[in-house]
Image (cartoon, coloured by chain):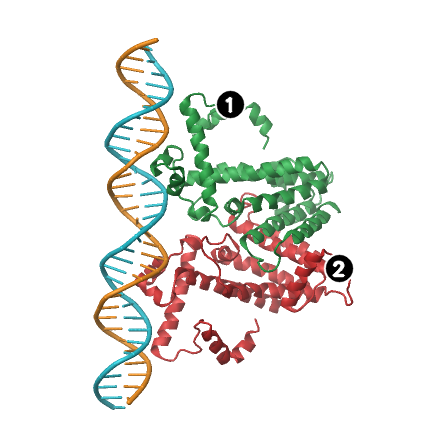
Chain colours: A red, B green, C orange, D cyan
Amino acid sequence: MLSFVVTALDFLHNGLMEAHGEAKPAAPRTARERARAELTAEIVEAARARLAEGGAIGLSLRAVARDLGMASSAVYRYFPSRDALITRLIVDGYNSLADHCESAMNTAGTQGPQQWDALAHAVRGWAKANPHEFALLYGTPVPGYAAPPDTVDPATRIVVRFVQMLAASRPRSAGSAERTVTPELAAQFDFVGETVGVAPDDEAFIVGTSVWTALFGFVGFELFGSWNNTFEPADHLFSAHVELASRLLFEV
Amino acid sequence: MLSFVVTALDFLHNGLMEAHGEAKPAAPRTARERARAELTAEIVEAARARLAEGGAIGLSLRAVARDLGMASSAVYRYFPSRDALITRLIVDGYNSLADHCESAMNTAGTQGPQQWDALAHAVRGWAKANPHEFALLYGTPVPGYAAPPDTVDPATRIVVRFVQMLAASRPRSAGSAERTVTPELAAQFDFVGETVGVAPDDEAFIVGTSVWTALFGFVGFELFGSWNNTFEPADHLFSAHVELASRLLFEV
DNA sequence: TGTACATCAGTGAACGCGCGTTCACTGATGTAC
DNA sequence: TGTACATCAGTGAACGCGCGTTCACTGATGTAC
């Protein structure tokens, strides 16, 4: 998020990142650096393609190296381990989804219902176009793989956007001492709100999280085959769900 | 479903099943048959335990055989392939979940809201108690594994119960020529209704499927770690969601 | 009840495969003087 | 601008591992007479 600021602060940012061990060179100048950047991208691309067959678990360094026509050991010049490659795919996936959704929302206008409609269809559209990446992000976790903290921020981007939308539509009324949820839940809502920097109404939070789980639950059902033979295709049902959600979110 | 009828027709049923290659002997009498039944159960149990580590993909015949102290080739006397073992785990999983939910609903009474409350909490409770089985049933499909038709009926049991509840609460009004959804969606609703043998109202169908996806989406999020650091524990949020769903389902 | 034969459970070795990762190496590219 | 050295990319072989499945075999259990 705030990518325009990051661009302006690129130099400082990269300096900090390198200090943390994340090599992300600003601009490759030497031939070596250019070649390195290109091959890294090619490896990631080949891995993404591999994902399409065998899923996240079938993703093997050797297969990726084979597809690129290089020795399997060469990949280790670019990624220290298989897990690092997976992490990269996860980060890229979250960013790809967030980019897709944000641009859809931005062209949809500033009205809440329109933004929601755009967001929901963008999530589903992206997931259907990239089913294995969706599974990597929101499906069964890869056994033995522990997501590093680097994945948190990209994963949060889309949620932040949604919570902002919630708050814009139904902010908590001023001077609200009384809450409508249990103290434990209120504290969790507050934490999320503070992290994002907004404060939606309690009811909006409940409806919002419910609608959010329904959205991802729907897409998961559709991709993982949970309603084969019933809602195939699921387009009309999905639209009905989005409409229902819209009523819940915006017609208080 | 219709297990009482099946029980009455057990003899015929098993005869038919055997004709289809599904060996399910009625009552083991000889020592060999008893031993076979026991060992089959032990293999399934060991496989279920294996599931807990490594997930569905990590499940290997060799590991199961190792845990039981037998040669890996011996397992082939009981299951013709690894996929057959997985199928068995899936079928057992669906049945286990359905049993758990049905008994919870049956003790909850006949009122819709009570039944829904029991069902929702039963689904989540079962999933938290059996996270890897949940992942096997509703998570990312196992790559290379194609679920045979045998898994359909067990998978349907719990859905049938839910749709029956929907219909009992909000049946389609008699003489209903006019539908409130697109023809395509109406046809899909009709197909589901006819399969189950009931006819819920169109709006009930929309709300019901939405609530259903929200329920499984919620549990998926919780088990797969999608809202680590936010709703941990998620008990209060879940209860709020169940309440919201109850209002949508029963307060028309 | 006893014997001869058929059926079945379980063994251990083997086939052929793929995997992640390491390591010593070569040759090319970059850099300091 | 030219040379000497350091850095890095990529190779191919190897280690050690696990997997699903097959197969000829042995010994125990069941069955027909």
Is disc 2 surrounded by few (<14), some (14 to 19) or many (20+) residues within 10 Å? few
Dividing the picture into quadrants, the one containing residue A49 is bottom left
User: Which chain is disc 2 placed on?
Assistant: A
| B244 relative to A128 in the view: left or right | right
Q: Is residue A114 above or below residue A216?
A: below
Please tell me which residue is depicted at 58% across the width and 29% down the height of the picture: B3
Viewport quadrant of the N terminus of chain A: bottom right
- The chain that hosts pointer 1 is B
* Amino acid type of the residue tagged 1 in the rendering: Leu
> How much space separates mark 2 and mark 1, taking CA atoms?
61 Å
- The residue nearer to you, when weighing B44 against B164, is B44
Say which residue appears at 48% left-offset and 46% top-offset: B52
Q: Which part of the image, by quadrant, shows the C terminus of chain A?
A: bottom right
Q: Horizontal and vertical percent for residue B178?
A: 71, 45
**Residue A88 in view here:** yes
| Residue behind mark 1 | B12
